[in-house]
Amino acid sequence: MLEQARWAARNAYAPASAFRVGAVIISTSGRMFTGANIENDSYGLSICAERVALFKAVSEGEREFSELAVVAETDTGEEDAPPCGACRQALQEFSPGLRITYRRDGEHVTRLLSELLPDPFGQDGKDV
Ligand code: THU
């Protein structure tokens, strides 16, 4: 999956940060979706690789996910890439038990989303 995420990062559009991120998400039905970060001159419109992958998958009919892998690179090499808080919230809407692999302090680690976002916002009684 990390290799797929590295491949996805090649399509990052990151003129503002030069921080290219690639993500791969796997649905419980076994489909794989990739994403890359897409920036904009109006910086606030930029979107992270994880949400691109997630939204592609949801828009293709998937609602439940088992694994996500993320990588980031700059011109000097691979970088740490823990998913940002906004992506954690977006992901937990669908799969609080998601396993996420990313680089932290130079090591690849796998964590549960519920560890990374222990007390998420959520509406009671929602029918997903
Ligand atoms: N970025 C991601 O794609 N994923 C993250 O989890 C954190 C940050 C992107 C957003 C922006 O295009 C660039 O990395 C620098 O913040």
Image (cartoon, rainbow, N blue to C red):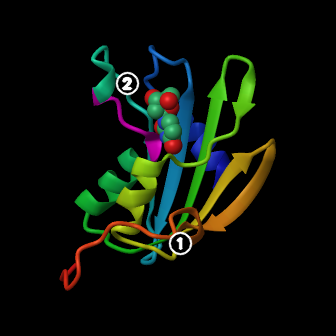
Disc ID at residue 114: 1
What is the x, y in percent for residue 73? 65, 29
Q: Is residue 61 magenta?
A: no
Residue 43 in view: yes
What's the amino acid at mark 2?
Glu
Ligand 1 lies under 8 Å from the Cβ of mark 2:
yes
Locate the N terminus by quadrant. Answer: bottom right
Which type of secondary structure does the marked residue at label 1 adopt? helix
Q: CA distance from mark 1 to mark 2?
A: 28 Å
Q: Residue 122 or 22: which is nearer the viewer?
A: 122
Please report whichever mark, 1 or 2, sits nearer to the chain's N-terminal start.
Answer: 2
Magenta residues (range): 45-50
The structure residue drawn at horizontal position 33% and vertical position 68%, both measured from the top left corner, is 93
What's the amino acid at mark 1?
Ser
Which type of secondary structure does the marked residue at label 2 adopt? loop
Q: Is residue 42 above or below residue 55?
A: above
Residue pointed to by mark 2: 39
